[in-house]
Image (cartoon, rainbow, N blue to C red):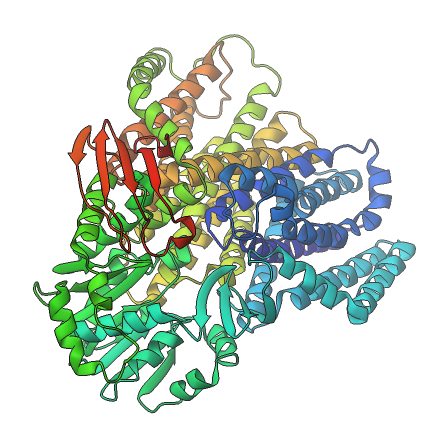
Amino acid sequence: MKGRGPFLFLGLLIGFFSLAAQSLLFREHLLAYAGNEAGIAVFLSAWMVWVAVGGVLGRGFRKAEAAGENLPWLLLLYPAAFLVQLLLFWSLRPLSGVGPTEQLPMAALVGWTLTLAAPVSLVTGFLFTRVARVREAQVREGASATAARLYGAEALGGPPGGASYTAAVLAGAPVLPTALGLLLFWLLASAWFSYRSEAAAAARVHLLVAVAASAAWLAGGQAALERRRLEALPVPAGLEVLETADTPYQHVLVAAWGRTRSVFANGELSATLPGDADVTAEAALLLAEKPDAREILVLGAGAEPLVCELLRVPAVRVTHVSDDGRMAELTARHLPRELSRCLASPALRQVTSDSRRFLSQATPRFDVVVARFGEPRTAQAARFYTAEFFGLAQSALAPGGLFSVSISAPPNVLAAASLAYAAGVHKTLTGVFGQVVFTSGSRMTFLAAAEAGAVTDRPDELERRFERLRSHLPEVEPGVLATRFESARIAALEQGFSLAGSELTATDESPSVFLLNLMVEYRATRLYELFRSVRSRLLPGFLLGLACLAVALLVGRGFGLRRGEPAPGGEGRLEGTGLLALTGFSGMLGQVVLLLGYQVRFGSLLAEFGLLNALYMLGLFAGTVVAGLPRVSRVGRRCLAATSLAALALSIALVFGLVGGGLSAASEVVQRGAFFAVCLVTGCAAAGVIVAGTRLLEEGGMTVAGVAATVQAADNAGAVAGALGGGLVLLPAAGLSGCALAASALPAVPFLAMLVGSRASGPGKRPAPVPGLLLGRVLFFAWLLLGAFGWLLPALAPAPVSAPSSVAASVDLPGTGAAGASRTSEEGVVSLSSAQVAPGMAGYGGPMDVVVDLERNERIG
């Protein structure tokens, strides 16, 4: 590999392949646990861990010449690692011992992902350092310049890779053919690189591997891999798979169980065809509430059975909006004959559009709006359970119109965390609509209207209204509607809501329903409680001590105090490593917030993950180019780092404005453009910090390979802390805007420290280290960090789930013929006993005596 051309080409190639592969693997990783976006933080942190490890391992060769001879052969590691990582991700559930219908515990999710995400990211970090090491042996130039050029080339290669993958997904290309195309592209490009590097034997091997992979694919490899992938999906065993498809939004699977057809989206049951008695009863309830309804809007894919039940009334016209057109086409091919005839009715208008976009453009003409989406266990579904979405639904209603949304009924165990799920939806609705009532049963249906009195929960009145329509729905027996409004059940649920803490209002910037499910489903409640406990009990005294010490350091001698001789290179290495780690932490926390905010706002993260990362990488490249300009390169490293940190803080502050609703009134085009611009600006600012960090490391006496390895290790180690610590611990407590605020505040700390240090040491002079100076800087940083987390963010956090200190109540909670239930609460403990559980829990029938500690959210008897 001689000359700058092959060197930069390999950097471009690594950037292209790594970002395209990361986007595809991110999608496959989400499938392992039903698409929950908690995996954003887990996946990115695991990726960064192994990139950092690979960067350090890349320094292992003693002789650069030997590394240069072996480099064309080392490029074969990428396709092997990619295939191995796909197989490992598909084995995540079997390896963790979690069944296909169970939720992965958070500990298993984090632990196994950190283990299984190694192959591709490890090779990425390893090759980056290897290429820098080989280049160092060929030319004698500054270590920081060489590392910056390689980093810039990798950043420039990333955007085409991410954009190409996004284009393939939007075009409807299946995952496995896309993966094959990516592998063949790498093998052909690396063969050309090997040939240009005078390694003809390696080039021939690359071509042979490409031919062998294509032959294996045609000889049955595609079918074998598809079967292996289907086995990894969280779908109940025993179902006959009829058809699958990868859409821009999710993986869709249609399976058969006898005459029943089940539609799964990312492993979650989305629809059951042809429907059941509950669907007919729901249609009867909606029509009884609005017997004169003429225009009905049904939102959500998989709602075809409900649509057909509503169309049985001749006067009704239905508009059905499906967010995923590919899923709607797949479902239509497997509908029973009677449903197919129904969907051909002239009274039905079918639209493929994002539901939020459709509502924002709709006129207020619908008598009934029905939202039928999956449970808000993911940010993609939770975007339809926020105050902003409910406001859009209300704007589409005609005067006196009705809005309906359904969720799984809370269990007959009044634990705070589980009831707060339903309580959060109820509280969010009451903040938008003037009247909200709800039903009991296997599913809880909320009925809301803008005007008080527009909705009735009186069973006798509902039965009277429905008599006019009974001829159209004769299957609905008398009394069925009354069972959904049993006063004892409703009273029990209302009391449960108050115990669970119904202050949790879900918004786009703080989708508390999704975050609460993240804690409940993934058993992260103890982690959240630990954070709250430390914040409330230990933080005040600790902060006071740190504040006194920091003030003494600042007022006393300052950060630039000179004493003794500087240790050779020591300070440059420490400062450079610290800058890179801080940039990684702040940037990754901001990126997690940005991606989650994008998913909540638009719901298309799976398709556009590669595009967003491509824009960030393009910003990295632009920042690297700007920082390498002659005029900029003459700027002092401290000034460059301080300016870049300030820009990074500003860009993440823009994230705060986006997810906090700063552009909520703007059009979708403007909002998307703002997200894209923030990705560019954040990448550009981060590149400036990285370049400044490489200069500090070079001043510390590091070689090119040492600088490259440290950049990978420090930056990615900080990113891991930002993804896991912020994305999983801080996010449930502070919401998206709170995390973005923390990420934008952190870079201001070293910015201030550098300004103080430069001013104290004088222009052009390098400040010398002082005994205790590093400790002082760390403590000052920790003081501001903990101060932001402990005092500022709780003000933005949703109210914690808690129970009254002492509550006593006795209510009847009958099931079908139940004898009743009683409940008392002392210090947050609830006891229930009933002869029969609620409908929908028939599998758990029989006497039940349960005691739940509301504060700890655990069963104690």
Residue 653 appears anywhere in the view = no
Q: Is residue 315 above or below residue 627?
A: below
- Where is residue 496 shown, x and y percent of the image? 23, 43
Left or right position of 553 against 252:
left
Q: Residue at x 73, y 37 (%)?
A: 58
Q: Is residue 30 above or below residue 482?
A: above
Snapshot quadrant of residue 221: bottom right
Residue 686 appears anywhere in the view = yes
Q: Is residue 242 above or below residue 264?
A: below
Q: Residue at x 59, y 25 (%)?
A: 573
Q: Which of these two is toward me, 234 or 535?
A: 234
- Where is residue 107 shown, x and y percent of the image? 52, 36
Q: Is residue 334 above or below residue 163?
A: below
- Where is residue 409 shown, x and y percent of the image? 32, 54
Q: Which of these two is toward me, 721 or 671?
A: 721
Snapshot quadrant of residue 317: bottom left
Q: Residue at x 44, y 20 (%)?
A: 778
Q: Which of these two is toward me, 147 or 790?
A: 790
Q: Total label count?
A: 0
Snapshot quadrant of residue 119: top right
- Where is residue 81 shown, x and y percent of the image? 73, 49
Quarter the C terminus occupies? top left
Farthest residue, direction right: 201
Left or right position of 701 against 575:
right
Left or right position of 586 against 295:
right
Q: Residue at x 89, y 53 (%)?
A: 199
